[in-house]
Amino acid sequence: MRDLINRAQNAVPGVAFIAILLSLLEAAARLGLVDRSFIPTPSDVAARTVEIIASGKVVEPLLATTLLLFVGYAIGCLSAVVLGILMGNYRRLYNFFEPLTELLRPIPKAALLPVLILFLGLGPSMKVTIVALAAFFPVLINTVQGVRAVDPVLTDMARTFGHSGVAVLWRILLPASAPYIFSGMRISLGISLVVVIIAEMVSGSGGLGDVILHGQRMFLVVDSYAWLVVVAALGFGLNSLFRWAERRTTYWVSPATQ
Amino acid sequence: MFKNQREALADANSDRLAPRDAWAALSVRRIVALFWDTRLSGICLVLALLCLWEASARFEIVQSLNWPPFSSVTVALYDGLATGDLESVIGSTLWCTLRGYAIGAAIGVVLGFAVALSRPIRLTVEPTIEILRTIPATAVIPPLIFIFGLNDPLKLFVIAFAVVFPIALNTISGVASIDSIYLQVARTFGVSRARTLYRVVFPAALPFIMAGLRTSLGLALVVTVVSEMITGTGGVGYYLVQMQFALRAAEMYAALILLTAVAYLLNRIFVAWETRVIHWARTREAAWSEQ
Amino acid sequence: MERAVKTSPRSMNGEALSLGGITKIFTSRHNELLAVQSVDLAVQAGEFLAIVGPSGCGKSTLLQIIAGLISPSAGKVLLGNEDVTGQPAHMVYLFQQYSKSLLPWQTVEQNVKFSFSHRMHLSRTATRERCREYLDMVGLADFRDHYPWQLSGGMQQRVAIARALAAEPRVLLLDEPFSSIDALTRLDLHALLLDLWTQKRFTAVLVTHDVDEAVFLADRIAVLSRRPGIILEIIETGMPRPRSPLETHENPKFLAVRHQLLSHLLAKPESVDARPH
């Protein structure tokens, strides 16, 4: 009980801060201090957001974006982890692939959008591809780093008990480098979200990015902010989900190695 | 391991063989080892892929306007640089990136220190940070157009917005990671709080701050390109979209290559500077760069 | 007391393990390091052998060569009658850094399972029974659902021992297993180790720099010289078993052997020619 009261007390300044900011904005807009046709009141935005959700208009774009994000992210991360573990463990494989990945890595993945549009058009395959590319590299680098950081005592120990090479990869290297992999996946999540939105904006074929841009082009000020709130909620939700998954998988990491 | 050992001992004994045979045997083995044990195999892979690209385009194995041979791309690159088009485009992007990055980094570091060192500030500001940091910067651009209009301040704000939170968070974790023993030592010697901040806290947090600054550089560049694509206000982003519409693939690839080279150089310069600044840290992070 | 040897295979001489002419050279780009030179050693089945030497003399290297973790530059290791290449099935290695050798994301019981469940295909119940049996032997039955980082150093080493024995090795190789454990816990673990060795009758090869430990535990002690390591002498401890932590240390034979060992180890470095071959 004490703990709960403490937590509530600690939350007060933060919540108050947000409340005060929003009220100031509301007041400024209502009093005409800022042009309401450009900066809507928080209450208007909130109302529109609720309307979007309640009417079910939110479902289609939200689902489209989330699905594409998920598929692209999964493909990118999975392939990066597989390649990363192999590259981290086998020096020759690393030597073989490293120049190529080092060459491709600095490319700002969003800049690949026009190229991919020329090849894959404006549809979901283009979006999934660019998200996968964006997610791939941070995870790859972190995975390799993680595998390298695994204490050789663990792999030696597994070998002395007669575990095969594959078993060592799967049962030792993968779990042991999990903290690093998650760190890379967290970076990738942020990048993937950015990239999927811009991909939708540029291709104009549905999804949250498209809807926000549409709001701007049609001069629907309140709409555009309301959809921004939806995107923010998506980002926040995904992030929280990620942190939960990370905590559950890396429960064993001691503070010293974190 | 055992094979190398045998080789090492054999090399030592090789002067027992006939000189000509010995030389030949050494060469072949050495070359194979050189190929697989160094990055040479990887470099050959890249060259092989480039040749494949050139061949597949020239011999029309892949028939498409979008697939110009690598040689055409180099020609376009040369032309673009010669006419100054590419320079101005990339220069404009770079200038925008650096300004927005500088603003965001400065605010981020200050914010980070403020939150890390002052509990009241942390309690007040932390929830807002937690909410704002997960908003993808690209989604913020269209609504902000209403406020800023389609020009520089918009882009600078968006870049700064994208960069400020990762940097602040890295700063916070940098300060948090300071071994309390440093602070205890300072207290034992009666060092003032201000001095402790300047002499102990700031340098100790520096490796983390640098790591955050480094990764945010790439992020700033991406956000710049993205905002140019949306707002159509010049720079590489807009150029790439234009070339895409005009179906001028070679120019598009050329610009992409130049952009990548610039991004790579920027990173290298930063890492070189970073290693100088925190030469005492010698962490593994300093040798790895992430994006 | 007659020692019945249970499962050790016999070569023609009743040896469990024999080393012939083991040499190891570490090469790097700039120089070569001769770690161990022409070591011959025969370990009898079921005996407890200690290898003692100063720091850096190559004793850990020797043990790793026996375990198959490192390949020798020259010479052979025979387990029973077979050449040792790679990791032989009936030999288990106990690491010096025991806490780093335990899988931190698995419980104590799962860690014990790790040593044998992939080679012996037992049912889930049988596997669990076996884990609990060995954990019980080391006194950690109540901790089977804990994680390694929740245990003290001594307890972690006991988990490592339980894990090692659960694989029912014929030969147990111990690499300075108690060097980073406090003195009192160490005595406890000595008693535990001897107890288990008496019960399970494996061959034990212990590498240590702790002279008292070697004399207390072992039947024979091989003394290694400074680098490059060669065997200076093999000393029989010749004390009766079972040994007691309180009384054995006061046994005159103990003191004599200890004296002999220390006089080797504390001697000033000699020139290479003066060493016995």
Image: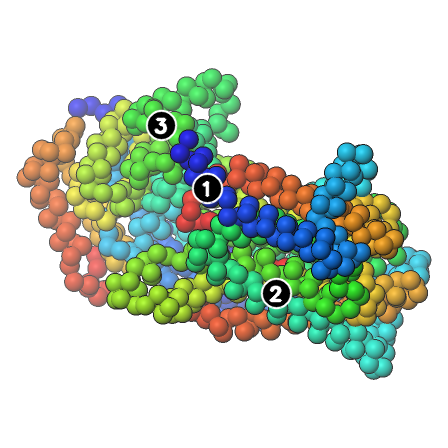
**Taking A189 as reference, is B45 above or below it?**
below
How far apart are labels 2 and 1 at the CA level?
Answer: 31 Å
Q: Residues within 10 Å of mark 2 (few under 14, many from 20)?
A: many
- Disc 2 marks which residue? B104
Q: Residues within 10 Å of mark 3 (few under 14, many from 20)?
A: some
Which chain does tag 3 point to? C
Which chain does tag 1 point to? A
Secondary structure, mark 3, is helix
Q: Amino acid at mark 3?
A: Phe
How far apart are labels 3 and 2 at the CA level?
Answer: 51 Å
Q: Nearer the viewer, mark 3 or mark 1?
A: 1
- Disc 3 marks which residue? C143
**In the rendered image, which quarter is residue C102 located in?**
top left
Secondary structure, mark 1, is helix
Which residue appears at 21% of the width and 34% of the height?
Answer: C188
Which residue appears at 75% of the width and 52% of the height?
Answer: A40
Residue C160 locus on image (x, y percent): 36, 35
- In the depicted view, which residue is nearer to us: C12 or B281? B281
**Taking C171 as reference, is C7 above or below it?**
above
Which residue appears at 18% of the width and 46% of the height?
Answer: C211
- Disc 1 marks which residue? A9
Q: Amino acid at mark 1?
A: Gln
Residue A169 in sight here: no
Which residue appears at 15% of the width and 31% of the height?
Answer: C243
Which label was assigned to residue A211?
none
Q: Looking at the picture, do discs 3 and 1 lie on one chain?
A: no
Residue A145 locus on image (x, y percent): 55, 54
Q: Looking at the picture, do discs 2 and 1 lie on one chain?
A: no
Q: Nearer the viewer, mark 3 or mark 2?
A: 2
How far apart are labels 3 and 1 at the CA level?
Answer: 39 Å
